[in-house]
Amino acid sequence: MKIYRNCSLLPYNTFGVDGRCSALVEYDTEQELCDILNLVQKGELPSPVLQIGQGSNILFTGDFEGTLLHCSISGIQVLDSSDTEVLVKVGAGVVWDDFVSQCVENGWYGAENLSLIPGLTGSAAVQNIGAYGTEVKDIIASVRCFDMREGLYRTFDVNECGYGYRDSLFKKCRDLTVTFVTFRLSTEKSFNLSYSALQQAALAEGADSLSHIRDIVCRIRRSKLPDVSTLGSAGSFFKNPLVERSLFESLKQKWPDIPGFGDNSGTGPVKLSAGWLIEKCGWKGKSLGRAGVYEKQALVIVNLSGATGEEIAALSRLVADDVFKKFGVSLSPEVLIL
Ligand code: EPU
């Protein structure tokens, strides 16, 4: 492992905000987490300890007075395969899209709709990343962690991971550091075309292969979301809010075109599109200082040029306040604000 003291945060967050952390540890085996825990317990590494991936879902609003852990555990290993599926164990430090690309090359179905999502495989399992009708929990079999409080390795079956919309046990218990994720992928041809823009493009182009579906997903994603290497962001800044159906019905009286997604019973809560709410408040393409609301997707906040984390957070608070004033709906950040 490598320990860096008083280290710049710049390479470790896709918002591209500057700042320092007291210590940063790069490690590439799960055994090293035991050694890291010892150093923390002896006071040789400062607390709190936080695992980060590529920092694609974090906003630092100041210096981080603790230890950041950056995982480089690598490896994509087939554990088992049958006529219909394959079980693959992936190191938490594998870049998520590199794994998706491997799945496509190997003819493993299930991950392709999650193409091009920034971050590492471990973070994907923490965040339960989702896009175009698929959530990563749909293809996870189990998650292996090191418990930084108990000093134990633990493996959680997918049903024990507390998965929900952009939520998991690992998000709530930050002491659980993900080391490996095991995926169950299909080797039989099957695509999830439930997202209408994907379905339309797939039909129009007669897409019939994994690589073609991946290309379409990448194209849709690039058309809506900024490339973090040129424009700092963390994807969607807020979660899409879940509201009581009665509130949705009353909003629909006033705004008949408000998008709402509920279950088929027509009675339960409804998920609203935060991007639509923000756009209706007039924020799309607008900025506050050096932070802006992305012109092509209002759910994304961008660092226009050298913004501080606090400037980005200030814009997000203003946006959320306006949405609340106009619609009576609270937005909660998807991004971890530190
Ligand atoms: N919309 C607007 N204006 C906007 C953006 C969206 O009116 O500026 C409305 C449109 O009606 C659109 C609907 O919102 O039909 C949904 O928009 P979109 O399909 O772009 O998806 P989203 O709900 O805004 C979610 C995820 C994205 C994911 C896309 C596609 C969350 C918080 N975000 O966005 O995930 O890529 O669906 O599946 O659930 C991320 O988590 O970082 C992320 C990018």
Image: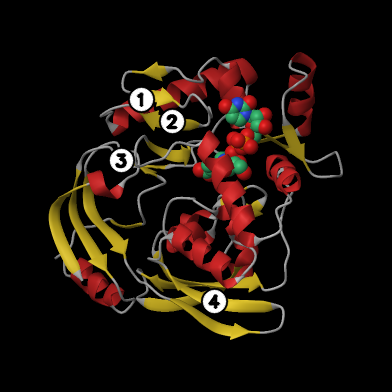
Label 4 sits on residue: 88
Nearer to us: label 2 or label 4: 4
Residue drawn at x 23%, y 76% is 35
Which of 150/29 is in front? 29
Where's residue 175, x and y in %? 39, 63
Query: Which structural element holds mark 4?
Result: strand
For residue 291, the mark is 1
Q: Is residue 291 left or right of residue 133?
A: left
Q: Of marks 2 and 1, which one's residue comes earlier in the chain?
A: 1
Q: Residue furthest right?
A: 265
For residue 60, the mark is 3
Dot 1 and dot 3 residues touching (CB under 8 Å): no
Q: Residues within 10 Å of mark 2 (few under 14, many from 20)?
A: many
**Amino acid residing under circle 3:** Phe
Query: Which structural element holds mark 2?
Result: strand
Residue drawn at x 73%, y 63% is 190
Q: Of marks 2 and 3, which one's residue comes earlier in the chain?
A: 3
For residue 301, the mark is 2
Q: Of marks 4 and 3, which one's residue comes earlier in the chain?
A: 3
Dot 2 and dot 1 residues touching (CB under 8 Å): yes
